[in-house]
Image (cartoon, grey):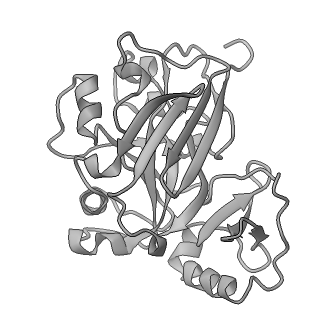
Amino acid sequence: MKLIRFGEPGREEPGVQLEDGRRIDASGEFHDYDEGFFASGGLEALAEWVAQGCPGGPEVDPVMRLGPPVNRPSKIVCVGKNYLDHAKELGEGIPTEPALFLKATSAWSGPEDDVLKPHGATKLDYEVELAFVVGRTASHVDEEEALDFIAGYSTFCDFSERAFQKEMGGQWTKGKSSDSFAPMGPWLTTADEMDDPQMLRLWCKVNGELRQNGWTGDMLFSVRQLVSYISRFMTLLPGDVVATGTPAGCAMGMNPPRYLQAGDLVECGVEGLGGLSQRVVAPNGA
């Protein structure tokens, strides 16, 4: 099952994308795909509604904007340097435990929304990632049971302003959290349709040039390990998003670096989960 949200930013409605490509409005039955939805058995109810043929659900205009497939989560947890080739290209050592950081939820963005180059930005970067959405409250989860806590998977791009992240002191958050820096989508594929999250190709193109071409099997820490590890340090709530890291090929890892400029087109994809498309836009005066 593929969950979508459609409509203007901040006013999205829930829906589903069917196997034949049609998009169906589910707002007559469900309020939104948020913490309450996942915590109260919403996925099971939605699956039953879809199996019944989506009664009462009108078809969504295919040109309608898609928003991120879940409502803004309580937190976006990201994993740094989780692919060996990416860790090597950065030259900052190989992590012995997952390197965690948070992105501000105000960075939440849709799968084809513009990415806004922040004022004063000089080193805008991209990172394609597999993301998962937490399906039920997770605290101190055993690895063997970890996948049972996942509602579904999606494509994510971790945009960064490296000068803010690396050259201005403190933690990474300031370089990761600008508006539009967390696009996800185009849909959330439910976990029952994922055979193995460690068997997926993921890629990123900039202006048609393939920059990243990786495989989730190369993660230093698997999805199972990440659920268990993160839940030791914070409670993951239903609807929370975890971005699992990126393979080699980011702009900062190139010699010389090839950072994004206004007008560039960034396209990201994860096998079977759909793709993102972001145009870099510089606000007035930036």
Quarter of the image with the C terminus in it: top right
Q: Residue at (34%, 50%) from the top-left corner?
A: 216
Looking at the image, residue 18 lies above or below residue 259 = below
Foreground residue, 111 or 42? 111
Quadrant position of residue 207? top right
Viewer can see residue 159: yes
Q: Judge from the rendering whether residue 80 lies leftward or rightward of residue 121; answer left or right.
A: left
Quadrant in which the N terminus is drawn: bottom right
User: Residue drawn 28% across and 63% down?
Assistant: 224
- Residue at image point 63% right, 66% down: 3
Residue 142 visible in the shown view: no
- Horizontal arrangement in the rendering, residue 113 relative to residue 245 (left or right): right
Say above or below: 127 vs 48: above
188 w.r.t. 212: above or below: below
Instruction: Give how far across and how far down residue 223 sits, in percent.
Output: 31, 59
Say which of 10 and 250 sits in front: 250
In the image, residue 248 lies at what x, y percent?
Answer: 34, 32
* Above or below, comparing residue 64 to residue 179 in the picture: below
Query: How far across and how far down the image is residue 184, in percent?
Result: 57, 49
Left or right of residue 166, residue 281 in this image: right
Q: Locate residue 196, reporting x and y percent.
A: 35, 65
